[in-house]
Image (cartoon, grey):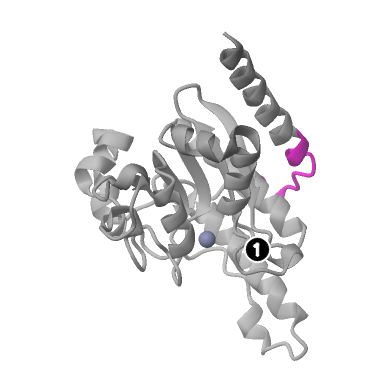
Amino acid sequence: MQHVEHMNTAVRLARYALDHDETPVACIFVHTPTGQLMAYGMNDTNRSLTGVAHAEFMGIDQIKGMLGSRGVVDVFKDITLYVTVEPCIMCASALKQLGIGKVVFGCGNERFGGNGTVLPVNHDTCTLAPRGNAATGYESVPGILRREAIMLLRYFYVRQNQRAPKPRSKSDRVLDKNTFPPMEWSKYIDKESFIANFGEDYKAYYENGADLLGDNVDWDLIESHHDNIIEKLDSQCESFKLNVHKKSRV
Ligand SMILES: [Zn+2]
């Protein structure tokens, strides 16, 4: 499943964010026709001191820097975004206005989710996609490495709590590594699209509210540090950029 492979990268970047005192939310933008990485982003609100510096916005800025504003709109329909946490309402709206091809995410965003949890911005009628086509929303596929995304958020909240001037009672700070809420697939995706994405074999997972990869958590992935990930991602984005320039010369 290529979704899992790309989400693995996003999760590693989210772990990097956690290690740098940011909310562990991260994303990568993949050029769907070539499978190449175009851009990446992680939450940057603590460093930038603005509430809008979400992971998705960092990636959009990178693509804008590479292709210019016009180029962003031209290429966006060919992009699949992999993000560890469901885009918030603001980011979901930005992605829709830019006409993104598809979004794949890990866990739902309980308070601000804009792809089904709180609002379905990706399928609404009041946020216009480019060229005024209100009806064209984007498909959003949830639940890829969901437990890993949830665990990273839990690590973050436990850590935040410990830094509070008056730490709450000890029981509040216990890290839950065992229980996960049931997955409500139907909030985000209908059964037909679910099967189109994952195949008939997984149909029962949809009905049972089960995680796609079963009960296992990839502890190794989320507990290791990924200090060199930025260099790796930068060099991948650089090779995409070179390909774009090669093409435009022909
Ligand atoms: Zn956001």
The vertical placement of 49 against 36, above or below, is below
Helix, strand or loop at disc 1?
loop
Residue drawn 72% across and 51% down?
16
Give the quarter of the image for residue 163.
bottom right
- Total marks in image: 1
Image quadrant occupied by the C terminus: top right
| Residue 229, image x, y percentages | 73, 39
Q: Magenta span has 246?
A: no
Report if residue 213 is visible in the image: no
The vertical placement of 132 against 178, above or below, is above
Residue drawn 33% across and 42% down?
131
The answer to whether mark 1 is within 8 Å of ligand 1 is no
Give the quarter of the image for residue 198.
top left
| Residue 32, image x, y percentages | 45, 29
Compare residues 95 and 225 and report the one nearer the observer: 95
Compare residues 234 and 95 and report the one nearer the observer: 95
Residue at the left extreme? 192
Decide if residue 220 is on the left or right side of residue 191. right
The vertical placement of 166 against 9, above or below, is below
Compare residues 108 and 1 and report the one nearer the observer: 108
Residue drawn 63% across and 60% down?
53
| Residue 135, image x, y percentages | 23, 48
Residue drawn 57% across and 46% down?
60
Q: Which residue is mark 1?
A: 23
Image quadrant occupied by the N terminus: top left
Magenta residue span:
221-231
